[in-house]
Amino acid sequence: MKRILKIIILIIIGIVLSLGVGTYIFYKNIHVPASNEKNTSTVSRNESQNKEQAIERKNILFVGSDENNLSDTIFVINYDAVNKKINILSIPRDTYYPRPGFNAPEEKKINAAFSEGKIEGLEKAVEDLLGIKIDNYVILNYEGFKKIIDTIGGVEVDVPFNMKYDDNSANPPLHIDLKKGRQVLDGEKAIQFVRYRHGYVDGDLGRIKAQHQFLEAFLKKMLQPSILPKVPSLAIAVSQYLKTDLTASEITQYAYQFIKDKPSTINAMALPGEGRYEGNTSYFFVDNIKVQEIVKELFSDEVSTSNTSTTSFAENKNIKVEVLNGAGIPGLATKYAEVLKNEGFDVVKIGNVIGMTFISSHVYARTDEERAEKVAKTLFITNVEKDISPDANVDVTVILGKDKE
């Protein structure tokens, strides 16, 4: 859903600015937390730049927050102004993300990192999960989403099947009742469409596909000339329900670039993996091998092909690693050992953990914590622990759990 909000923000702001209204509205209305002081030098530099120069490429975390302060929808956008591309990666809210000290089943989902650690907790979770740096965030709640859709007169989509769902225990109660077929959805029905998730064969991934469909329809509507007179109302709607650490000056710069060089390509992808139950709780388990491929494709700035990469590869050769299969899944240790070898690590042992099954994967520092962190980042493992031993034959021990299946 907030994938929608990402582009919506850029387009709305761009149109507003083109009419000469945007700068004023955003400076007056947008919520900019006190923590923005850290960006002051960047803003000043940006303001002094020639606007004909392409804006800096950044990774922006977009979050759709529900009434219970859960990150109901999560995605990362990377706006490549030079190549006129927008890259979007959706992250299912049930993505398995264990954290030390949080052992309850629901606490092992990535959206719990937002409810307990707020946006800082979610930023760290996404950075750990993808191996990239999050530069800024944007949070939009349901009420703001509905206001925007109502202001533009609704969005036409093809509802694939009858959507019926009631949850009276939700706060406030959730009621979804949509009929199959092409129709114009107002704000209330649009929020029902993007929130519905119980009737898809592939669960939350089906919901993400529906959100992609909604995004395309929304963009088509936003580009209609009839939207122009509604721009001031749209800008106000966004500013009232939006929280971000992007300053008004930065938003202005993004909008200027967006309207000058409209992106010709939008790459919208979902985090690769599969949903399955662990005990009585449903999780989405990430395919870490495919994640690395997608990160390289969508966030190429984060994957350097310069001398730095060559240096890192050479340094990795000095790190001895043992990879142990703690999940009882045939070939698991060999699979991830190959990943480490391809990054230059010296894998000196591949084996199995006997007598115990691990749900979560772990990385143990046997000689040096920094070396363990490098291995953990390569394999997208968040559990890193110290087990320093002067008699250790390896620098790092990796125990693979069922989350790496």
Image (spheres, grey):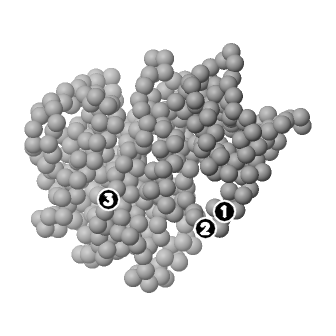
- The image shows residue 351 at horizontal and vertical percentages of 69, 28
Q: Is residue 192 visible?
A: yes
The residue closer to the viewer here, 42 or 341, is 341
Q: Which residue is mark 3?
A: 266
> Label 1 vs label 2: CA separation?
7 Å
> Which residue corresponds to the image point at 79% horizontal and 34% vertical from the top-left?
387
Task: Give SS at disc 2.
Answer: loop
Looking at the image, the residue that sits furthest to the top is 355
- The image shows residue 22 at horizontal and vertical percentages of 30, 70
Q: Is residue 264 above or below residue 260?
A: above
Q: Residues within 10 Å of mark 1 (few under 14, many from 20)?
A: some
Q: Which residue is mark 2?
A: 306
Q: Which residue is mark 1?
A: 310
Q: Earlier in the sequence, mark 3 or mark 1?
A: 3
- The image shows residue 173 at horizontal and vertical percentages of 28, 28
- The image shows residue 266 at horizontal and vertical percentages of 32, 59
